[in-house]
Image (cartoon, rainbow, N blue to C red):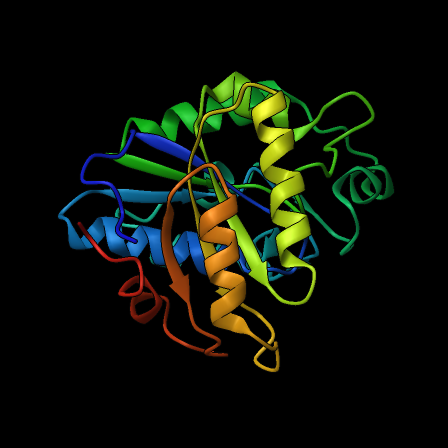
Amino acid sequence: MPLPTVLPPALFVTGTDTEIGKTAASTALLHALRRRGLRAVGMKPVASGSHDLGEGLRNDDALALQAASDPVPAYADLNPYALRQPLAPELAAAEDGVQVQLAPIVAAFERLRATADTVVVEGVGGWMAPLSADLDQLDLVRALRLPVVLVVGLRLGCVNHARLTAQSLQAAGVECLGWIGNHIDPAMQRQDENMATLVQRLPMPCWGRLPHLPGADCAQLGTHLRDA
């Protein structure tokens, strides 16, 4: 289950739900790319649940992407929309009196692209979580012309969630390069059998399987995304 030898200059990481490890997979990807000698930079266009550290609002997931990046990007480019409340992005933006728009995200993305060989763009929540009343993550993927990598949170129900998300991506005409399994429930029964079912049923290749390692270094997680 290796990473492809050649990857596009940017990709979008989405998930089957919220809290299923998109950031863990994204930072692991950044380190795997850096092991190849590439300049790899993360981006979190919209982040819910941010706090003020004295230099403006900061989000923990975005900071993790920044720490895993080389070169290290400006925070404002990495995370154009840092929203205070840990809510669905549309609700969090409304709470802050903000409307998420594509233009600032596209401009920040282009600045990041100018500094890196690869940009790993992490979505927010699950694939179908809207960004605003009239903006979906699909619109962002199309505006940035990105292929997608799907993170599957390995827990009870993951086969259903993964297949539904894959069907939605296919129906929208989105190119899905691969998927990454992430063990978020160490008590999950029949883990190997569930992985085998996902490998058989999902229409894209598996890039790796991240173990349940709370607090693990993202460089260590990156070793579980094996090169071909």
Rendered position, 225 above or below 216 = above
Can residue 64 be seen? no
Rendered position, 10 above or below 14 = above
Report whether 220 appears left or right of 142.
left
Q: Residue at x 43, y 38 (%)?
A: 204
Q: Nearer the viewer, residue 217 or 50?
A: 217
Report whether 66 appears left or right of 126.
left
Q: Farthest bottom residue?
A: 187
Which percent across, then down, holds residue 114?
29, 26
Q: Residue at x 63, y 39 (%)?
A: 165
Which percent across, then down, holds residue 93?
78, 39
Which percent across, then down, holds residue 47?
63, 47
Q: Nearer the viewer, residue 223 or 91?
A: 223
Q: Residue at x 68, y 66 (%)?
A: 156
Q: Tally the marks.
A: 0
Can residue 13 be seen? yes
Report whether 7 appears left or right of 14.
left
